[in-house]
Structures are given as C-alpha cells and as structure tokens.
Image (cartoon, rainbow, N blue to C red):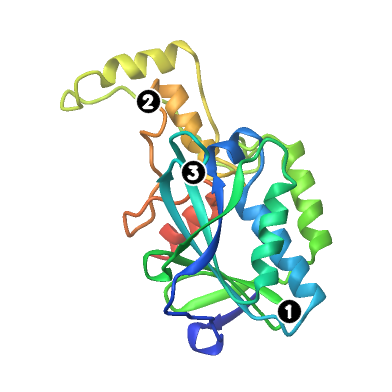
Amino acid sequence: MIKKSVSELSFVNKGSPLPTVEVDSHSVENAGFSIYRTVMQVLTQLAEQDASLRATLYMYASASVNFREQSWSEFLLVAGPNKVLLALGAGFERLPAVKSRFSDYVSSSIALRTFHVEDGLVWEQEDACTWYSNGQSLADLTEEAEEADDDPELIEGDEEDEDWDVEEPDAEDEQGADQAVATAERRAVRYRAARSDAKVSSIRAAIEEVFGLPEGSVALCGPDRRALRGDARIRTLRKRWEES
C-alpha cells in the first residue's frame, strides 16, 4: 500500500458543476454488483492505459426519479478528461439489469471526493489528511471480484472472539425490543463477525432481516456519525473506528 498526504496529490478541482454518471443504487445491489468495484475496475484500466491521466471522482447520493420511478441514486461526478466520464458510463451500461445514465451536472461542493487517478494509480481517501493506493492491476481486481462472488459475504470463519448472540434486553429498552429478540432467538440465528470484504449493504440487510426491521432503517456509521455508503466494505468501517 502506498500512502500520500493530500498536499502530495494534484486533485482536479473545478468551480463549475461537473458532468455525472447516475447509477440506481438498488438496481446495482439487486443485480449482485458493486458500484465501488465497477468504478475501481474502470479507473484502474484507464490508469494502466495512460500513466499521465489525472482525474478526480466525486460521489453524491440523492433520491431520484430519473429512472421513471422513485429511487435512490449515486451520482459519479467526473473532474477530468471526458474519456473518464464515457468509460464510467460504458462500465455500468455493460452490467445486466443495472440502471445507469449520463445525468445532470452537479456541483462538487455538495459531493464527497472519493477517487483520484494520478501517476498510473487509483487513489482512495483514508482520512482527512491521507490518501492511499493498493497498486492493484485490473487483473488483480477481476480475480478478487470473482473470488468475492464465489464466497458468502456474511461469515468470516477465521476470526475468533467476535461472535455475537442476541441478548435479553434491559427493562429500560424501548417497547417492542423483547419481541424482536424473541423472534430472532426462535430463528436460532447466530452470526460470526462479518467478513472484511462484505458490503455494508449486505450486513445492513442481514440485521434488518434478523430483527424484522423495515428496509433502510439500519445505518452503519463511522466515528463521525455519518452512515457509510452501501458499497463500502466492512473493513473500512472497522478501520475508521479502530483509528478514531
């Protein structure tokens, strides 16, 4: 892993609104794909083809009706050459059953700077001051994606002392908690620690199913109390709390 401070990277910053690729989040999850993985594959391929390429990708999540129904979308804002925007659009268009489109221009001031391409590498944010690159090739990412698709995401069998069971609630717990616990116990549900490469969306959905909670009611948050995106990995959640 290579790390650099924000001052060592030349981010592309533009004051004007940026062109976007809009992706329906639910369609991606339902089809079994990952926005994060797709973006990484596209950007890595571009970086391998042109080591001089420099581009910064921002992400903004919002409710949307651009796919002719109420949905939740991720907008990928591209600051850089137009070929990056076109490659991202083509990357998502190739995914079966995934809804995507070239969409509205959005200001980067309301978005989160998420990826950066420079020196032939794809960089991601580690914290407010540091960015990192794993230096993976497109072949590495493709192999990793195939392995992840073959393995269940919810169980991590090599971790110890991280088991959790449903416990009896205190008398001060909110009304209805005892029924939720009883339902979970009747199902004899017992999970080990979530896999490090599991998606936040998968673990969120598992918690909602176990406790009979409404879809979308569970959020996995970092130390700053901000919910992580559904395509983020559990290792990211753990790392943020470990370093807080």
Q: Quadrant of the C terminus?
A: bottom left
| Disc 3 versus disc 1: nearer the observer | 3
Number of numbered discs overlaid on the protein picture: 3
Q: Amino acid at mark 2?
A: Pro
Q: Residue at x 57, y 44 (%)?
A: 199
Name the foreground residue: 52 vs 149: 52
Mark 1: few/some/many CA within 10 Å (<14, 14-19, 20+): some
Label 1 element class:
loop
- The quadrant in which residue 95 appears is top right
Cα distance between the residues tagged 1 and 2: 43 Å
Mark 3 / mark 1, whichever is N-terminal: 3
Residue 67 drawn at (x, y percent): 53, 39
Residue ID for mark 2:
214
Of the numbered discs 1 and 2, the one sitting upstream in the chain is: 1
Q: Is residue 196 visible?
A: no
Circle 1: residue type: Gly
Q: Residue at x 43, y 28 (%)?
A: 208
192 left or right, relative to 85: left
Q: Position of residue 183 (x, y in %)?
A: 39, 13
Dot 3 surroundings within 10 Å: few (below 14), some, or many (20 or more)? some
Q: Which residue is mark 1?
A: 120
- Residue extending farthest to the bottom is 8
Q: Mark 2 or mark 3, which is nearer the start of the sequence?
A: 3
* Contact? badges 3 and 1 (CB < 8 Å): no
Which residue corresponds to mark 3?
66
Q: Is residue 25 above or below residue 191?
A: below
Which residue is at the far left? Answer: 172
Nearer to us of marks 3 and 2 is 3
Q: Amino acid at mark 3?
A: Asn
Q: Residues within 10 Å of mark 2 (few under 14, many from 20)?
A: few
Q: Position of residue 5 (x, y in %)?
A: 51, 84
Could you say which disc has been placed on residue 87 in the image?
none
